[in-house]
Amino acid sequence: MSEVKIRKGESVDKALRRLKKKMDKEGVMREIRAHRHYEKPSEKRRRKSARARMRSN
């Protein structure tokens, strides 16, 4: 779990911005979106191969 401690004299907005940046770097939100719905193994393979095709072109 990501954690950010508020520094002395730091606004809550800045601390929230640091938390969001840290979560983005760790890939937390991407994991949450990926697990939002069940995805069949065949769908995972299809999505993975499509992404590989896009990268190779």
Image (cartoon, rainbow, N blue to C red):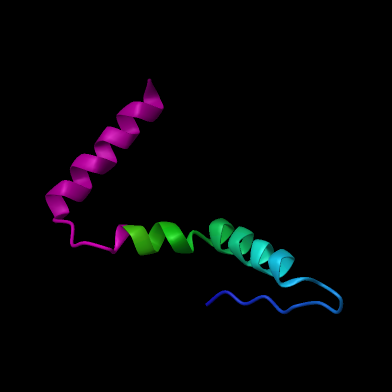
**Foreground: 21 or 44?**
21
Q: Is residue 36 magenta?
A: yes
Residue 41 left/right relative to 47: left
**Foreground: 24 or 42?**
24
Residue 43 left/right relative to 2: left
**Foreground: 54 or 7?**
7
How many marks overall? 0
At a point 86% along the width and 79% down the height, the residue shown is 8
**Foreground: 3 or 42?**
3
* Quarter residue 18 falls in: bottom right
Establish if 12 lies above or below 43. Answer: below
At a point 18% along the width and 57% down the height, the residue shown is 39
Quadrant assignment for the C terminus: top left
* Quarter residue 20 falls in: bottom right
At a point 55% along the width and 57% down the height, the residue shown is 24
Residue 8 left/right relative to 46: right
Q: Position of residue 28 (x, y in %)?
A: 47, 64
* Quarter residue 36 falls in: bottom left
Q: Position of residue 14 (x, y in %)?
A: 73, 64
Q: Position of residue 26 (x, y in %)?
A: 54, 61
Residue 32 left/right relative to 16: left
Q: Is residue 12 magenta?
A: no
Q: Position of residue 49 (x, y in %)?
A: 26, 37
At a point 19% along the width and 41% down the height, the residue shown is 46
Establish if 42 lies above or below 2. Answer: above
Magenta stretch in the rendered image: 34-57
Q: Is most of the magenta stretch helix, strand or loop?
A: helix
- Of all residues, the one furthest to the right in this rendering is 9
